[in-house]
Image (cartoon, rainbow, N blue to C red):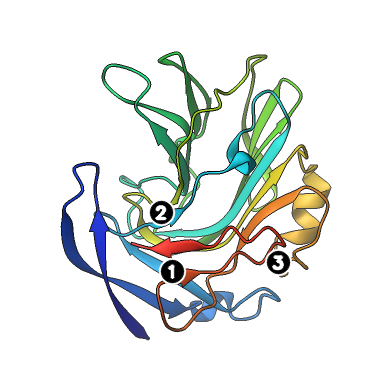
Amino acid sequence: MRNLSLFLSVAVLFLIPYTLYLIPFSSAQANLPGAGNCLSFNGTSDYVDVPDNNYWYFGSSDFTITAWVKLNSISSGGAIVSQWINYCSTGGQIIYFHPTLGLTWDVSCVMAFVQGNTSGWTAGQWYHVAVVRNGNNFNMYRNGLSIANTTWSGSLPNYAAPLIIGSSFPGSIDEVSIWKNKGLTQTEIRNTMCQKLVGTEPGLVGYWRFDETSGTTANDSSPNGNNGTLK
């Protein structure tokens, strides 16, 4: 285990010292082909900041977000992946992917969502999660099985905001992938969930393995160079 002493810059731009841990997979996951290191978040001040760019502008296009996650507590948990912007008077969010609550997104301050739930989850256990848009259909998968779905025909707003991984997340995250203009099928999710991606798969715009053992950079293993910074 290696401790990385980092600092969190919040909206008011002051710094709070904290520690981000880079740890190996639990022994329960050691047999997975994709096993390596992961990031453990304290649930309050740790996160990974990935700079804003056009890759996170989904609009009405298909997309997929996947990750391996382990929650310390099922009753609480922040976002696996989120993108925030103050386009409402009270602030808002473009996309918020939560392991048990599902996927939510705000459009003109009106919330839409694919609703997950807290049943079937166990604290301290690794799960593969995915959220997919194919046309007007949204699906959330856990370990390759659909657990929630909804339909929506709107377009996500294209506001400039960094992509955040692990915001207020109490647990561990690994193997985060983001695909644009490609909604993975259930078969594709199952075929790739237990192995590392090559990084050049069609539609893959961001892929963070979190295998670094030092420093403050979370390298993007896709060709797009969307490296994140551990905050």
Do tag 2 and tag 1 residues touch (Cβ < 8 Å)?
yes
Which amino acid does the dot numbered 3 rest on?
Answer: Cys
Which amino acid does the dot numbered 2 rest on?
Answer: Gly
Marker count (numbered): 3
Q: Position of residue 173 (x, y in %)?
A: 48, 62
Residue under pointer 2: 166
Residue 48 seen: yes
Crowding at dot 2, Cα within 10 Å, few <14 / some 14-19 / many 20+, comes out as many
Res. 39 mark: 1
For image coordinates 40% across by 72% down, the residue present is 216
Q: Position of residue 153 (x, y in %)?
A: 67, 14
Q: CA distance from mark 2 to mark 1?
A: 9 Å
Which amino acid does the dot numbered 1 rest on?
Answer: Leu
Compare marks 3 and 1 and give the one earlier in the sequence. Answer: 1
Tell me the SS state at disc 3: loop
For image coordinates 42% across by 63% down, the residue present is 229
Q: CA distance from mark 3 to mark 1?
A: 18 Å
**Up/down of 63 relative to 73, above or below:** above
- The residue mark sitting in front, 2 or 3, is 2
Compare marks 2 and 3 and give the one earlier in the sequence. Answer: 2
Front residue of this view, candidates 14 and 79: 14
Crowding at dot 1, Cα within 10 Å, few <14 / some 14-19 / many 20+, comes out as many
Res. 178 mark: none
Q: In the displayed structure, does residue 57 sit left or right of residue 37?
A: right
Front residue of this view, candidates 41 and 116: 41
Tell me the SS state at disc 2: loop
Q: Position of residue 124 (x, y in %)?
A: 41, 64
Do tag 2 and tag 3 residues touch (Cβ < 8 Å)?
no
Residue under pointer 3: 194
- The residue mark sitting in front, 3 or 1, is 1
Q: Which quadrant of the rendered structure holds the C terminus?
A: bottom left
Q: In the displayed structure, does residue 23 sit left or right of residue 17?
A: right
